């Protein structure tokens, strides 16, 4: 539940509360379908220099980042 809350609130603050896009791009399955899971995990952990995407490696383990990617690719749970 903590990771669901983190994604919905922290990631959602830029990617939209429904992950449909905002300051950052949409994180819905159709928007991510052409991006490899390892790339997405790398972006979560290392961020994207020159953009608003910060690195999360201080807060997330490799396994947690992989869990987030897996769930984003199949449709993120509501947490309810």
Image: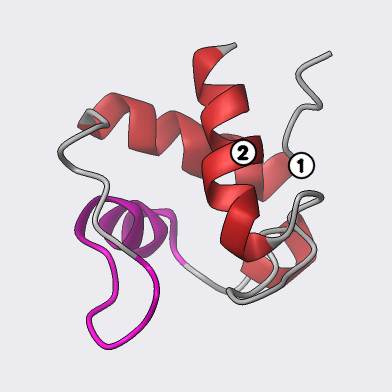
Q: Residue at x 22, y 28 (%)?
A: 61
Q: Exactly how many numbered labels are in the figure?
A: 2
Tell me, for residue 9, which label it has, or none. Answer: 2
Tell me, for residue 75, which label it has, or none. Answer: 1
Q: Is residue 75 above or below residue 47?
A: above
Which percent across, then down, holds residue 54?
Answer: 30, 62
Mark before the other along the chain sequence, 2 or 1: 2
Which percent across, then down, holds residue 48?
Answer: 29, 75
Position of the N terminus, as image quadrant, is top right
Tell me if mark 1 has few (under 14), some (14-19) or many (20+) residues whose alpha carbon lies within 10 angstroms of its own. Answer: some
Q: Is residue 80 above or below residue 19?
A: above
Q: Residue at x 15, y 38 (%)?
A: 58
Q: Is residue 38 left or right of residue 78?
A: left
| Residue farthest to the bottom, as pictured | 50
Which percent across, then down, holds residue 29?
Answer: 74, 57
Q: Is residue 46 above or below residue 49?
A: above
Q: Is residue 45 left or right of residue 75?
A: left
Q: Secondary structure at mark 1?
A: loop
Q: Secondary structure at mark 2?
A: helix
Q: Give, as a single range, the part of the protein colored magenta.
A: 36-53
Whether 42 is among the magenta residues is yes
């Amino acid at each position: 539940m903590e990771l669901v809350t983190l994604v919905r609130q922290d990631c959602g603050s830029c990617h939209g509360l429904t992950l449909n896009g905002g300051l950052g791009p949409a994180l819905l399955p159709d928007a991510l379908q052409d991006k490899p899971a390892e790339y997405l995990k790398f972006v979560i952990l290392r961020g994207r220099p020159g953009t608003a995407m910060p690195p999360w490696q201080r807060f997330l383990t490799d396994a947690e980042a992989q869990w987030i990617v897996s769930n984003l690719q199949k449709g993120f749970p509501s947490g309810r």
